Image (spheres, helix red, strand yellow):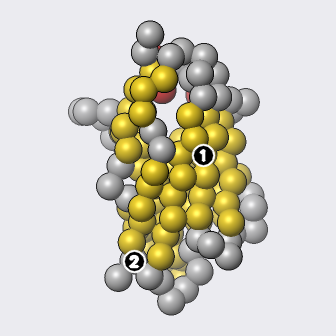
Amino acid sequence: QVQVVESGGGLVQPGGSLRLSCEASGSRFSFDDMGWYRQAPGRQRELVASITSGGSTNYADSVKGRFTISRDNAKNTVVLQMNSLKPEDTDVYYCNAAIVFGRRWDYWGQGTQVTVSS
């Protein structure tokens, strides 16, 4: 049984920083992709940032230059460092861990709230 557990999040003022952490466990196979998505009520879940096991990264245009994603393959952990936060970054953030073997298996965390407000 794969489990994806997030930590971090909370309330921060505009211009501030937050760090989201996530650990995936319970898989016999390595996680090829790990990443963070966000979703607001009534909107589709969208990619924030992802990173492959080889270290290739992908960022949403809206967060480039402000957010940094990193991972530890040995520990199956992924971290999203968020700097220069804006009110529009307010959302529920979900950690994703994916296994790609012929098809893609996605596993999700429970979500963590990030609120950017003065």
Report helix, strand or loop for mark 1. strand
Tag on residue 100? none
- Is the C terminus in the top left, top right, bottom left or bottom right quadrant? top left
Give the mark nearest the N terminus, 1 or 2: 2
Q: Residues within 10 Å of mark 2 (few under 14, many from 20)?
A: few
Q: Residue at x 73, y 30 (%)?
A: 65
Residue type at mark 2: give it: Val
Q: Is residue 110 above or below residue 53?
A: above
Q: Is residue 111 above or below residue 51?
A: above
Q: Position of residue 31 (x, y in %)?
A: 57, 74
**Which residue is more in the foreground, 70 or 51?**
70
* Residue 61 visible (yes or no): no
Looking at this view, name the residue that lies furthest to the bottom. 28
Give the CA distance from mark 1 to mark 2. Answer: 21 Å
Q: Residue at x 60, y 28 (%)?
A: 17
**Which residue is more in the foreground, 33 or 4?**
4
- Is the N terminus in the top left, top right, bottom left or bottom right quadrant? bottom left
Q: Residue at x 38, y 59 (%)?
A: 109
Q: Quadrant of residue 110?
A: bottom left
Looking at this view, name the residue that lies furthest to the left. 42
Q: Residues within 10 Å of mark 1 (few under 14, many from 20)?
A: many
Residue type at mark 1: give it: Leu
Q: Which residue is mark 2?
A: 2
Q: Position of residue 60 (x, y in %)?
A: 59, 37
Q: Which residue is mark 1?
A: 80
Q: Position of residue 36 (x, y in %)?
A: 51, 49
* Residue 76 visible (yes or no): yes
